[in-house]
Protein backbone atom coordinates (compact mmCIF):
# COMPACT_ATOMS: atom_id res chain seq x y z
CA UNK A 1 0.00 0.00 0.00
CA UNK A 2 2.88 2.37 0.86
CA UNK A 3 6.17 1.99 -0.93
CA UNK A 4 9.33 3.56 0.49
CA UNK A 5 12.31 4.66 -1.57
CA UNK A 6 15.60 5.43 0.11
CA UNK A 7 17.67 8.47 -0.70
CA UNK A 8 18.97 8.69 -4.24
CA UNK A 9 22.70 8.97 -3.74
CA UNK A 10 23.55 8.80 -7.44
CA UNK A 11 21.27 11.30 -9.10
CA UNK A 12 18.20 13.50 -8.85
CA UNK A 13 14.58 12.72 -8.01
CA UNK A 14 11.63 14.40 -9.68
CA UNK A 15 7.87 14.25 -9.20
CA UNK A 16 5.49 14.79 -12.09
CA UNK A 17 1.80 15.78 -11.97
CA UNK A 18 -1.12 13.98 -13.66
CA UNK A 19 -0.02 12.68 -17.07
CA UNK A 20 -3.38 11.51 -18.50
CA UNK A 21 -1.89 9.90 -21.59
CA UNK A 22 0.47 12.81 -22.43
CA UNK A 23 3.61 10.69 -22.54
CA UNK A 24 5.20 12.46 -25.50
CA UNK A 25 4.91 15.73 -23.60
CA UNK A 26 6.43 14.00 -20.57
CA UNK A 27 9.39 12.76 -22.60
CA UNK A 28 9.91 16.25 -24.01
CA UNK A 29 9.88 17.70 -20.49
CA UNK A 30 12.37 15.08 -19.29
CA UNK A 31 14.68 15.82 -22.21
CA UNK A 32 14.51 19.51 -21.35
CA UNK A 33 15.66 18.93 -17.76
CA UNK A 34 18.40 16.55 -18.89
CA UNK A 35 16.83 13.55 -17.14
CA UNK A 36 19.38 10.79 -16.70
CA UNK A 37 17.73 7.38 -16.98
CA UNK A 38 20.67 5.69 -15.26
CA UNK A 39 20.89 7.81 -12.12
CA UNK A 40 17.72 9.92 -11.83
CA UNK A 41 14.27 8.76 -10.77
CA UNK A 42 10.85 10.03 -11.75
CA UNK A 43 7.91 9.68 -9.38
CA UNK A 44 4.34 10.22 -10.51
CA UNK A 45 1.25 11.30 -8.55
CA UNK A 46 -0.82 8.86 -10.66
CA UNK A 47 -3.54 9.31 -13.29
CA UNK A 48 -1.31 8.04 -16.08
CA UNK A 49 -4.30 7.23 -18.25
CA UNK A 50 -7.61 8.53 -19.70
CA UNK A 51 -8.49 11.68 -21.65
CA UNK A 52 -5.16 11.96 -23.48
CA UNK A 53 -4.08 10.17 -26.66
CA UNK A 54 -1.33 7.90 -25.34
CA UNK A 55 -2.90 6.02 -22.41
CA UNK A 56 -1.57 2.76 -23.92
CA UNK A 57 1.97 3.93 -23.20
CA UNK A 58 1.27 3.65 -19.46
CA UNK A 59 2.31 -0.03 -19.56
CA UNK A 60 5.64 0.75 -21.15
CA UNK A 61 6.31 3.57 -18.65
CA UNK A 62 5.35 1.49 -15.62
CA UNK A 63 7.94 -1.05 -16.75
CA UNK A 64 10.77 1.51 -16.68
CA UNK A 65 13.04 0.88 -13.69
CA UNK A 66 13.31 4.60 -12.88
CA UNK A 67 9.58 5.43 -13.08
CA UNK A 68 7.42 4.98 -9.97
CA UNK A 69 3.76 5.99 -9.72
CA UNK A 70 1.07 5.93 -7.05
CA UNK A 71 -2.49 4.89 -7.93
CA UNK A 72 -4.72 7.62 -9.28
CA UNK A 73 -8.49 7.50 -9.37
CA UNK A 74 -8.26 6.89 -13.14
CA UNK A 75 -6.28 3.70 -12.59
CA UNK A 76 -8.94 2.72 -10.05
CA UNK A 77 -11.67 3.48 -12.60
CA UNK A 78 -9.98 1.22 -15.17
CA UNK A 79 -9.83 -1.58 -12.60
CA UNK A 80 -13.47 -0.98 -11.63
CA UNK A 81 -14.60 -0.96 -15.26
CA UNK A 82 -12.78 -4.24 -15.93
CA UNK A 83 -14.45 -5.86 -12.94
CA UNK A 84 -17.92 -4.57 -13.81
CA UNK A 85 -18.13 -2.03 -10.97
CA UNK A 86 -18.21 1.00 -13.27
CA UNK A 87 -20.45 1.29 -16.30
CA UNK A 88 -19.18 2.23 -19.76
CA UNK A 89 -21.04 5.58 -20.14
CA UNK A 90 -19.68 6.81 -16.80
CA UNK A 91 -16.12 5.72 -17.61
CA UNK A 92 -16.31 7.09 -21.16
CA UNK A 93 -17.39 10.46 -19.73
CA UNK A 94 -14.19 10.40 -17.67
CA UNK A 95 -11.95 9.68 -20.64
CA UNK A 96 -11.94 5.89 -20.55
CA UNK A 97 -13.08 5.22 -24.15
CA UNK A 98 -9.61 3.89 -25.07
CA UNK A 99 -9.94 1.21 -22.37
CA UNK A 100 -13.58 0.36 -23.04
CA UNK A 101 -12.49 -0.39 -26.63
CA UNK A 102 -10.00 -3.04 -25.54
CA UNK A 103 -10.65 -6.77 -25.39
CA UNK A 104 -10.98 -8.34 -21.92
CA UNK A 105 -7.55 -9.96 -22.36
CA UNK A 106 -5.98 -6.60 -23.21
CA UNK A 107 -7.71 -4.96 -20.23
CA UNK A 108 -6.27 -7.63 -17.99
CA UNK A 109 -2.73 -6.49 -18.81
CA UNK A 110 -3.50 -2.98 -17.59
CA UNK A 111 -5.39 -4.19 -14.52
CA UNK A 112 -2.43 -6.34 -13.60
CA UNK A 113 0.00 -3.42 -13.92
CA UNK A 114 -2.27 -0.92 -12.13
CA UNK A 115 -2.97 -3.31 -9.25
CA UNK A 116 0.73 -3.20 -8.35
CA UNK A 117 0.79 0.59 -7.99
CA UNK A 118 1.00 1.65 -4.34
CA UNK A 119 -1.54 3.98 -2.70
CA UNK A 120 1.28 6.17 -1.44
CA UNK A 121 5.02 6.53 -1.89
CA UNK A 122 7.45 7.87 0.64
CA UNK A 123 10.69 9.19 -0.62
CA UNK A 124 13.70 9.96 1.54
CA UNK A 125 15.58 13.13 0.69
CA UNK A 126 18.42 15.05 2.38
CA UNK A 127 15.85 17.45 3.83
CA UNK A 128 13.45 14.75 5.08
CA UNK A 129 10.73 12.40 3.96
CA UNK A 130 8.41 13.37 1.09
CA UNK A 131 5.00 11.74 0.75
CA UNK A 132 3.45 11.22 -2.68
CA UNK A 133 -0.25 10.53 -2.92
CA UNK A 134 -2.71 11.08 -5.78
CA UNK A 135 -5.43 13.28 -4.28
CA UNK A 136 -4.62 14.08 -0.67
CA UNK A 137 -3.32 12.66 2.58
CA UNK A 138 -6.40 11.53 4.55
CA UNK A 139 -4.70 11.77 7.97
CA UNK A 140 -3.15 14.78 9.74
CA UNK A 141 0.06 12.93 10.53
CA UNK A 142 1.81 11.01 7.77
CA UNK A 143 2.99 8.46 10.33
CA UNK A 144 -0.65 7.44 10.89
CA UNK A 145 -1.17 6.48 7.25
CA UNK A 146 0.08 2.85 7.37
CA UNK A 147 -2.29 2.03 10.21
CA UNK A 148 -5.21 3.84 8.54
CA UNK A 149 -4.69 1.92 5.29
CA UNK A 150 -4.28 -1.43 7.03
CA UNK A 151 -7.16 -0.96 9.44
CA UNK A 152 -10.85 -1.71 9.40
CA UNK A 153 -11.60 1.32 7.20
CA UNK A 154 -8.54 0.82 5.02
CA UNK A 155 -10.45 0.79 1.75
CA UNK A 156 -12.18 4.06 2.60
CA UNK A 157 -8.83 5.66 3.42
CA UNK A 158 -7.32 4.33 0.17
CA UNK A 159 -10.25 5.82 -1.74
CA UNK A 160 -9.70 9.17 -0.02
CA UNK A 161 -6.04 9.02 -1.08
CA UNK A 162 -7.17 8.70 -4.70
CA UNK A 163 -10.30 10.87 -4.79
CA UNK A 164 -10.58 13.49 -2.02
CA UNK A 165 -10.53 17.23 -2.62
CA UNK A 166 -11.09 18.51 0.94
CA UNK A 167 -7.81 20.33 1.39
CA UNK A 168 -7.70 22.02 -1.99
CA UNK A 169 -11.40 22.94 -1.88
CA UNK A 170 -11.07 24.59 1.51
CA UNK A 171 -7.57 25.94 0.83
CA UNK A 172 -6.57 24.28 4.10
CA UNK A 173 -3.01 25.31 4.98
CA UNK A 174 -2.52 22.99 7.99
CA UNK A 175 0.75 21.11 7.80
CA UNK A 176 0.67 17.35 7.36
CA UNK A 177 2.81 16.38 10.33
CA UNK A 178 5.59 13.84 10.34
CA UNK A 179 6.75 14.59 6.82
CA UNK A 180 8.71 17.29 5.02
CA UNK A 181 6.14 17.65 2.25
CA UNK A 182 3.29 15.83 0.57
CA UNK A 183 3.00 16.04 -3.21
CA UNK A 184 -0.41 15.48 -4.80
CA UNK A 185 -2.18 15.87 -8.13
CA UNK A 186 -5.82 15.14 -9.02
CA UNK A 187 -7.27 18.64 -9.16
CA UNK A 188 -6.43 20.46 -12.42
CA UNK A 189 -5.01 23.90 -11.63
CA UNK A 190 -3.74 26.78 -13.75
CA UNK A 191 -0.52 26.71 -11.76
CA UNK A 192 0.88 24.55 -8.99
CA UNK A 193 -0.42 25.48 -5.52
CA UNK A 194 1.24 24.96 -2.14
CA UNK A 195 -0.96 24.75 0.98
CA UNK A 196 1.06 24.37 4.16
CA UNK A 197 3.56 21.66 3.26
CA UNK A 198 1.27 20.13 0.62
CA UNK A 199 2.09 20.66 -3.06
CA UNK A 200 -0.63 20.30 -5.68
CA UNK A 201 1.01 19.83 -9.07
CA UNK A 202 -1.72 18.78 -11.51
CA UNK A 203 -1.46 21.64 -13.97
CA UNK A 204 -3.90 20.12 -16.45
CA UNK A 205 -1.43 18.83 -19.06
CA UNK A 206 -4.21 17.14 -21.02
CA UNK A 207 -6.40 20.26 -21.24
CA UNK A 208 -5.91 23.24 -23.59
CA UNK A 209 -3.49 25.74 -22.08
CA UNK A 210 -2.31 23.23 -19.48
CA UNK A 211 1.15 21.83 -18.92
CA UNK A 212 3.01 19.13 -17.04
CA UNK A 213 4.58 20.25 -13.78
CA UNK A 214 7.74 18.48 -12.66
CA UNK A 215 9.11 19.24 -9.19
CA UNK A 216 12.68 18.64 -8.13
CA UNK A 217 12.33 16.62 -4.90
CA UNK A 218 15.47 18.18 -3.40
CA UNK A 219 14.31 21.79 -3.69
CA UNK A 220 10.52 21.31 -4.13
CA UNK A 221 10.85 23.88 -6.90
CA UNK A 222 9.77 23.34 -10.49
CA UNK A 223 12.50 21.73 -12.55
CA UNK A 224 13.34 24.21 -15.30
MN1 LIG B 1 -7.31 12.27 -10.46
Image: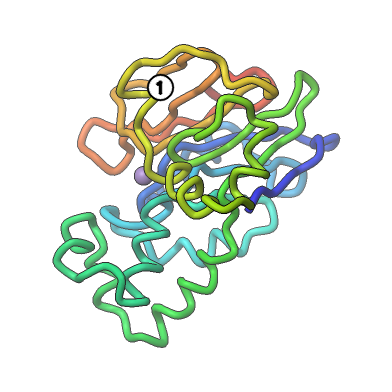
Tell me where residue 116 sits by quadrant.
Answer: bottom right
The residue under the point 40% across, 24% down is: 167
The residue under the point 26% across, 54% down is: 51
The residue under the point 40% across, 82% down is: 106
Residue 38 percent location from the top left of the image: 75, 48
Residue 108 or 43: which is nearer the viewer? Answer: 108
Q: Is residue 190 left or right of residue 48?
A: left
Residue 99 percent location from the top left of the image: 30, 71
Q: Is mark 1 on a helix, strand or loop?
A: loop
User: Does 77 sit above or below residue 32?
Assistant: below
Residue 69 or 2: which is nearer the viewer? Answer: 2
Q: In which quarter of the image is ligand 1?
A: top left
User: Does 27 sit above or below residue 219?
Assistant: below
Q: In this view, does 114 lie to the left or right of 94?
A: right
Crowding around mark 1 (Cα neighbors within 10 Å: few <14, some 14 to 19, many 20+) is: some
Residue 168 percent location from the top left of the image: 36, 24
Q: Is residue 174 left or right of residue 146?
A: left
User: Does 40 sit above or below residue 201?
Assistant: below
Q: Residue under circle 1?
A: 192
What colouring method underlies this structural image?
rainbow
Amino acid sequence: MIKTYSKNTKGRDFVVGDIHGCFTALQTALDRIGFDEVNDRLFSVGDLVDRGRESESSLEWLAKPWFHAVTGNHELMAIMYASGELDAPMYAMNGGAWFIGKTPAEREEYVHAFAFMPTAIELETDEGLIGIIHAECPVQDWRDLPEALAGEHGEAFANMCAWSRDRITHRNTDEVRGVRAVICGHTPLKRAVTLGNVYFIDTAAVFPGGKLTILDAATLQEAA
